């Protein structure tokens, strides 16, 4: 599929890669973009398109660190979208990886996970990787 | 039910052949039909109104549900956003700490010392003193044992200095083998006592650099100055520096008070 995302990321925006073929969407880094709507609407569009056109499972692999309020909201929207899909009987999963030196990120990931009934793993990254 | 009984009675009267020619028969029959129509319309009206009411109830229930959902989301959003805010704040604090730190010894760097002394100067109600400490002949250590050993020696010296200070005192690395002490609420006499104690500790410290096991020791020359009212703290440092030069000139391993 040609409509995969591959955004390099910057100090204020996360790097984003989507892989339609394997049903994976990955995001790494900080997110406090000037225009979070513009950034996340691409991501949400991709997720919606994938869920609509494919019947395969979707996995989000996140290594997000700092999120500003509008980015938190966008992530909640994405997680809600996954929840609806999962309630509809389809497989979805989230893997949130964090630097074990920063346990706070794990706590925040737990907060996000709260209302999600689908598999949502919070995993420490290998130190030094 | 009383209504139905009455209607049944009227119908029976209308159906009775003996009443067919009665002068009221036609009018009663029309009244009877009219009533039935009206009753049917009333029932339809009630049923429509009930339907509306029920769907309004459903809508209300739905709206309440959605509102509750939105509220929950909003609370969750604020909670998470607040925690990220804290995280950012902590990160800034950590950066701030690192930017004021000498990377080798972990002591305050020159930047932090300036900041600290400026704050002490702003609090004009309290006297304070500064002491400039220079390790004697430190170059010899670098030359003889190498720079890595020199770095280890500086770390050990920094530890000894910090361990000898009181709670509010600040010790920073001014440069190379020079350290600056900021001593709050301390007069020159007190500073001199404190510095004498410090000189002893430094003298007793074995830097353990020699492979033969012979203790490696150093001495320090120290200049002390008390901050004068309305004096720029940079001038206080300068006076301490001048006193340090005097201590060096007079043979090192001693402290001198600024004039």
Image: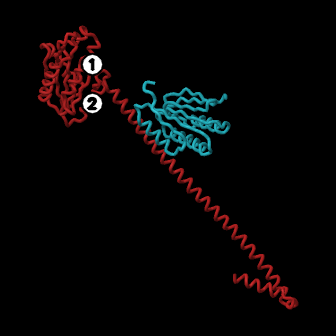
The reply to whether residue B143 is visible in this rendering is yes
Give the side of residue A24 with respect to residue B214, left or right: right
Write down the residue under mark 2.
Answer: B116
Q: Chain A's colour?
A: cyan
Give the side of residue B100 with respect to residue B4, left or right: left
- Mark toward the start of the polypeptide (1 vs 2): 2
The front one of B139 and B184 is B139
> Which residue is at a point 59% across and 30% down the rendered structure image?
A18
Q: In which quarter of the image is the N terminus of chain B?
A: bottom right
Q: Where is residue A52 in the image (x, y as percent from the top left)?
A: 66, 39
**Dot label at residue B175:** 1
The front one of B77 and A1 is A1
Q: Chain B's colour?
A: red
Q: In which quarter of the image is the C terminus of chain B?
A: top left
> Which residue is at a point 41% across and 37% down the rendered structure image?
A104
Q: Do callouts 1 and 2 point to residues on the same chain?
A: yes
Q: Where is residue A121 in the image (x, y as percent from the top left)?
A: 50, 37
Q: Position of residue B195 (x, y in %)?
A: 15, 25
Give the side of residue B192 with respect to residue A59, left or right: left
**Dot label at residue B124:** none
Q: Is the residue B176 above or below the residue A57 in the image?
A: above
Q: Quadrant of residue B187?
A: top left
Q: How crowded is mark 1: few (under 14 residues within 10 Å), some or many (20 or more)?
A: few
Q: How crowded is mark 2: few (under 14 residues within 10 Å), some or many (20 or more)?
A: some
Calculate the distance from the C-alpha at mark 1 to the C-alpha at mark 2: 17 Å
């Amino acid at each position: 599929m040609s409509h995969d995302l591959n955004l390099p990321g910057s100090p204020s925006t996360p790097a984003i890669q989507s892989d339609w073929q394997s049903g994976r969407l990955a995001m790494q880094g900080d997110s406090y973009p000037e225009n979070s709507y513009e950034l996340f609407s691409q991501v949400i569009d991709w997720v919606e398109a994938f869920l609509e056109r494919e019947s395969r499972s979707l996995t989000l692999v996140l290594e997000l660190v700092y999120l500003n309020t509008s980015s938190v909201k966008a992530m909640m929207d994405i997680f809600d979208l996954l929840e609806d899909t999962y309630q509809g009987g389809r497989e979805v999963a989230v893997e949130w990886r964090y630097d074990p030196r920063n346990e706070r990120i794990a706590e925040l990931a737990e907060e996000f996970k709260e209302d999600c009934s689908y598999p949502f793993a919070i995993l420490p990254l290998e130190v030094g990787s | 039910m009383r209504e139905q009984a009455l209607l049944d009675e009227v119908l029976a009267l209308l159906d009775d052949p003996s009443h067919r020619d009665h002068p009221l028969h036609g009018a009663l029959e029309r009244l009877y039909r009219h009533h039935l129509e009206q009753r049917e319309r009333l029932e339809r009206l009630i049923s429509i109104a009930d339907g509306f009411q029920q769907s309004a109830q459903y809508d209300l229930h739905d709206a309440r549900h959605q509102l509750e959902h939105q509220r929950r989301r909003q609370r969750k959003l604020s909670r998470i956003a607040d925690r990220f805010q804290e995280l950012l704040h902590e990160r800034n604090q950590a950066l701030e700490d690192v930017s004021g730190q000498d990377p080798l010894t972990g002591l305050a760097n020159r930047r932090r010392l300036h900041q600290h002394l400026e704050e002490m100067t702003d609090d004009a109600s309290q006297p304070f003193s500064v002491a400039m400490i220079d390790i004697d002949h430190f170059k010899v250590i670098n030359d003889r044992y190498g720079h890595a050993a020199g770095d280890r020696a500086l770390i050990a010296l920094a530890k000894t200095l910090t361990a000898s200070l009181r709670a509010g005192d600040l010790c920073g690395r001014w440069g190379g083998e020079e350290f600056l002490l900021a001593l709050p609420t301390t007069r020159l006499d007190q500073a001199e006592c404190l510095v004498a104690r410090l000189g002893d500790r430094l003298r007793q410290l074995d830097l353990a650099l020699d492979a033969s096991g012979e203790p490696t020791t150093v001495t320090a020359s120290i200049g002390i100055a008390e901050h004068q009212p309305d004096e720029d703290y940079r001038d206080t440092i300068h006076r301490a520096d001048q006193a340090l030069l005097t201590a060096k000139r007079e043979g090192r391993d001693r402290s001198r008070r600024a004039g």
